[in-house]
Each structure stands twice: as structure tokens, then as C-alpha cells.
């Protein structure tokens, strides 16, 4: 493909913009210089590292390495989602890890192996970037939904217990809360389907067009990716909500989530 | 000892924090058809005692029995329908009076109960001195006192064997307090339902002779 390569010198030119912002910050005392410098260095270092790692993985072309990378990415995602919810009374890591592994591997394998038709299905050039997008996006959906459910169970404790006291099982007592949590998790990916191509040109497609791919091919990839993201977000969110909800109630179907300070 | 107690605590220990139990090694029999008044200073664990009876809390040691069988032998929804708890602050769902009264009938475990029709609901509203309230009124338009009577009625529709009342009058003004206490006394007189009522100020319906359960030093002292 006739892709314009960016030489290191031209890459350095890109730094010129950041330097200009840095000077502005100093002149106007914006206090951004330190973060700006760290951010720029981290971007360059991390992406260079990623480039070499990907090159190495593509070169080795090993199914175990690909699956290993997939597991590490998923474990990080589970850890990040758990930290974001910040729930201490209910342990979240295993429900998160299990639902993420199942929903992410299902969507990633389906998309690379069946829809894109990569052969073998784990071909790193396809599997790793697509899995990365799946994980990055649905991690957000899962964290948002989970955070919403746990905090609503805590806030609406009196209403949940009222229903339990009137003979509801734990599913009936938490039905409305689960519905709201699922909606909160899914709405961003549904919104981005609504806006795709009208409000913004999706990132992956932009990259492919810049890399010289026919826009009509690029949109097909993008459509697959958008649908895949909604699918994996929905599946992952549903699984994690169902698993964690059970853990929020004890064997007597009593609500275990307590107010922050026990009275 | 009570013959055939409806509720029996058998060496029950419970605490939220390990090492600081609210009740310890508690054995207590509650007789059917009796009105119990749980009393004691605030924070001593009166509400917790009620929550243990309908399994909103689990003992850390010991066993609680209902009708001779451990609480764990019952499906939790059926247990809570038979041992009905009315909360301290009346809680209504954001809907009409009718929807609030029929709320429990939408739960699977209550599927065997006959769903009362409007005429029956209106008659029952009259029983709890809410004859001025229409079924289509939004529950949020009721006063707190009316709401508490609505909540008690909602529980009664499930025909419980035991009623747990957690300071049912503490959120109310003096007038509605008297009305609710009178209602509780009448329900007890009419149905003879075993009643366990928590009261901070030992507030009890004047017409009822309660057995007082005084909670103190992680034990319960029974004062007939």
C-alpha cells in the first residue's frame, strides 16, 4: 500500500505544537507544563513500546501468546472496573473477570473468525486490535452499570427491603434497579451507533482511510466494530449484573449492602 | 418457658462488628397471640431483634425457629410474608394507593393469594380509617400518618401470622400517633395476630396488656 511514512524528524515536528502550548502555559501561569511534559513523554514511550510489542507478537504468530495478551488485557480491565466502582462490602473481581472473559472472547472470536474471516481466527493482526477495542469499550459499559446498581441498592435500601418484607424474592426486589443499571451501561454505545457517520467519523475508520484503504471497505469494518461493541457491552453488562446482584443478597435473600456507616 | 412458641430464639448471638455482639447467647420464646413490646435505650439493638426474626439479618451463632422449624427451612419470600414487618418510616412506591396495596400481589411467592378487588380494597381502607382516601389518589399526596396506616393495611392483606412493628409511630405527629396506636390495638383485638412492637418510649396502645421484652446488656428480660 502507498502509505506516507512519517520520518522521525517529521514526528518531532508534532512536538512543536505541544511546545507552543507549554510556552503559553508559562506565560499565562496555567500550571500545565509538568502534566504536559509527562503526558507527551508517556504517549511517545508507551506507543513506541506498543509498536515493538505488536511487531514482535505478529512476528511470532503464536496462539498462546495471543491468548496470553488477551488474558492480561482482560485482567487489567477487570481491575480497572473494580477500582472505579470502589465497592468494599461485595467482592467484584471474580464476577468481573468471568463475565469479561466469556463476553469478550465470544465477541472477539466471532468477529475475527467468522465476520472478518481471519484465518486462523486468532491471527494477531486482527485479533489483538479488535479484542482491544472490545475490551476498552465494554469495560466502560460494565463499570458504569455496576457502579449504578451497587450505589442504587445502597441508596434505595429501604425500598428494596420493603419489597423483600412483602414477599418479593431478591430478583423482584431489585428489578427496577437492574433495569436502570443496564440502561445506564448501554446508552453510550447505543448513542454512538446513532451518531456514527453523522456527528463523527469513527476512529478506526479514520485510521484505515488514512492508511489508504477504500472507504467502502473501511465502513464495513467499522460497522462490524460498532455492532460488536454493542454486543459485547450488552452481554458483559448483563452477565456481571446478574452475578454481582446475587452476591449483594445473602442466603436468606437479605440485602447485604449496608449504608457506608453502620448505625 | 412457653408451650409451642411461634418464634423461638435458641442461644442466638448477633453483632455487626466481630467482638461486639448486640445480643449474646439469647434464648427467648414468643407465644402465639401475644402482644410483645420491645423496649430499651436507642442503639441497643431493638430493630435488629426484629430484623433477625424475619431474616433480614442472620445470627452469627444459634438458631431462630418459626412454628418449630428453623427460619432457613422456609423459602425467604414465604417466611417474610408470614412474619410481616412494617418499617419505621412508611414507604410507598411512586404510584397510586391501589398500586401500593396491590404491590405484594405482583410477587411470585404471593401468587396463591386472592387479589382483592376495588370494592374489597375500599372496605379495607375504611377499616384503617382511610375512608376519605380514594384508590386512584397518588400515594405521595397522603400525610405520613395516613401513609403508615396504608402500609399496615398493605401488610394485613397478606394475612400474616406474626406482625413486626418497628417504632411505627416515631415518624408521626401526636394525632396520627394515637390513630395508628388505636389501629394496632384493634387489629390485635380482632385477629389475635402475634405482634412484636419496638418502641423507644414504651409507647403502647392503652387497651393492650403487652409482655415487655426489655433489651439490656445483650440479653432480654421478660416483664409480664
Image: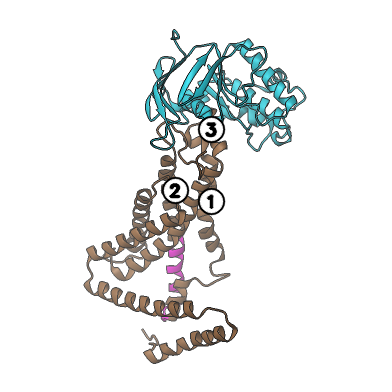
Chain colours: A brown, B cyan
Which chain is home to disc 1? A
Q: Going by the picture, which residue comes out furthest to the front?
A: B217
Residue A101 vertical position relative to residue A1 in the rendered view, above or below: above
Closer to the N terminus: mark 2 or mark 1? 1
Marks 1 and 3: which is nearer the front? 3
* Front one among B33 and A11: B33
Q: In the shown orientation, is residue A106 left or right of residue A152?
A: left
Residue B20 screen position, x and y as percent? 42, 34
Q: For marks 1 and 3, give the CA distance.
A: 39 Å
Which chain is home to disc 2? A
Query: Residue at (49%, 24%) from the top-left corner?
Result: B216
* Front one among A30 and A168: A30
Q: Which mark is residue A238?
A: 2
For the C terminus of chain B, the image quarter is: top right
* Front one among A108 and B110: B110
Residue A165 screen position, x and y as percent? 53, 29
Q: For marks 2 and 1, give the CA distance.
A: 10 Å
CA neighbours of label 1 inside 10 A, class few (<14), some (14 to 19), many (20+): some
Do the residues under discs 3 and 2 have CB atoms within 8 angstroms? no
Residue A169 screen position, x and y as percent? 48, 32
Q: Going by the picture, which residue comes out furthest to the right?
A: B132
Q: Secondary structure at mark 1?
A: helix
Quadrant in which residue B191 is drawn: top right
Q: Which mark is residue B43?
A: 3
Q: Is residue B120 visible?
A: no
Q: Which mark is residue A258?
A: none
- Residues flagged by tags 2 and 1 on a common chain: yes
- Residues flagged by tags 1 and 3 on a common chain: no
Q: Bounds of the magenta span?
A: A211-227
Query: Residue at (37%, 51%) from the top-left corner?
Result: A93
Residue bearing mark 1: A183
Query: Per the image, is B123 magenta?
Result: no
Amino acid at each position: 500500500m502507498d502509505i506516507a511514512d512519517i520520518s522521525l524528524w517529521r514526528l518531532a515536528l508534532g512536538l512543536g505544537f505541544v511546545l507552543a502550548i507549554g510556552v503559553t502555559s508559562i506565560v499565562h501561569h496555567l500550571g500545565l507544563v509538568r502534566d504536559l511534559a509527562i503526558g507527551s513523554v508517556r504517549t511517545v514511550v508507551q506507543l513506541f513500546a506498543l509498536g515493538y510489542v505488536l511487531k514482535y507478537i505478529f512476528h511470532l504468530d503464536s496462539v498462546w501468546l495471543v491468548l496470553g495478551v488477551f488474558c492480561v488485557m482482560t485482567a487489567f480491565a477487570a481491575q480497572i472496573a473494580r477500582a472505579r466502582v470502589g465497592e468494599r462490602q461485595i467482592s467484584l473481581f471474580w464476577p468481573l473477570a468471568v463475565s469479561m472473559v466469556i463476553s469478550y472472547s465470544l465477541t472477539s472470536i466471532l468477529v475475527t473468525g467468522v465476520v472478518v474471516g481471519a484465518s486462523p481466527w486468532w491471527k494477531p493482526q486482527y485479533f489483538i486490535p479488535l479484542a482491544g477495542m472490545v475490551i476498552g469499550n465494554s469495560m466502560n459499559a460494565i463499570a458504569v452499570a455496576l457502579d449504578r446498581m451497587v450505589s442504587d441498592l445502597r441508596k434505595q435500601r429501604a425500598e428494596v427491603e420493603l419489597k423483600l418484607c412483602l414477599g418479593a424474592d431478591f430478583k423482584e426486589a431489585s428489578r427496577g434497579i437492574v433495569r436502570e443499571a443496564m440502561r445506564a451501561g448501554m446508552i453510550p454505545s447505543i448513542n454512538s451507533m446513532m451518531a456514527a457517520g453523522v456527528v463523527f467519523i469513527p476512529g478506526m475508520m479514520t485510521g484505515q482511510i488514512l492508511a489508504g484503504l477504500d472507504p467502502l471497505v473501511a465502513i464495513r469494518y467499522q460497522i462490524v466494530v460498532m455492532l460488536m461493541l454493542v454486543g459485547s457491552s450488552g452481554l458483559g453488562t448483563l452477565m456481571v449484573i446478574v452475578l454481582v446482584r446475587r452476591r449483594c443478597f445473602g442466603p436468606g435473600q437479605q440485602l447485604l449492602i449496608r449504608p457506608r456507616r453502620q448505625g | 418457658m412457653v408451650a409451642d412458641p411461634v418464634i423461638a430464639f435458641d442461644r442466638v448471638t448477633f453483632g455487626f462488628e466481630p467482638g461486639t455482639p448486640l445480643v449474646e447467647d439469647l434464648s427467648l420464646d414468643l407465644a402465639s397471640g401475644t402482644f410483645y413490646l420491645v423496649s430499651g435505650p436507642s442503639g441497643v439493638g431493638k430493630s435488629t431483634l426484629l430484623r433477625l426474626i424475619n431474616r433480614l439479618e442472620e445470627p452469627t451463632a444459634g438458631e431462630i425457629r418459626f412454628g418449630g422449624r428453623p427460619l432457613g427451612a422456609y423459602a425467604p419470600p414465604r417466611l417474610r410474608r408470614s412474619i410481616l414487618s412494617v418499617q419505621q418510616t412508611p414507604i410507598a412506591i411512586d404510584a397510586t394507593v391501589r398500586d401500593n396495596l396491590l404491590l405484594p400481589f405482583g410477587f411470585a411467592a404471593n401468587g396463591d393469594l386472592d387479589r382483592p378487588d376495588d370494592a374489597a380494597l375500599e372496605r379495607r381502607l375504611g377499616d384503617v380509617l382511610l375512608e376519605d382516601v380514594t384508590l386512584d389518589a397518588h400515594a405521595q399526596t397522603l400525610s405520613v400518618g395516613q401513609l403508615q396506616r396504608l402500609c399496615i393495611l398493605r401488610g394485613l392483606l397478606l394475612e400474616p401470622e406474626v406482625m413486626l412493628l418497628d417504632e411505627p409511630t416515631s415518624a408521626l405527629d401526636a394525632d396520627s400517633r394515637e390513630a395508628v396506636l388505636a389501629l394496632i390495638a384493634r387489629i390485635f383485638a380482632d385477629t389475635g395476630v402475634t405482634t412484636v412492637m419496638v418502641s423507644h418510649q414504651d409507647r403502647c396502645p392503652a387497651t393492650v396488656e403487652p409482655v415487655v421484652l426489655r433489651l439490656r446488656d445483650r440479653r432480654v428480660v421478660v416483664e409480664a
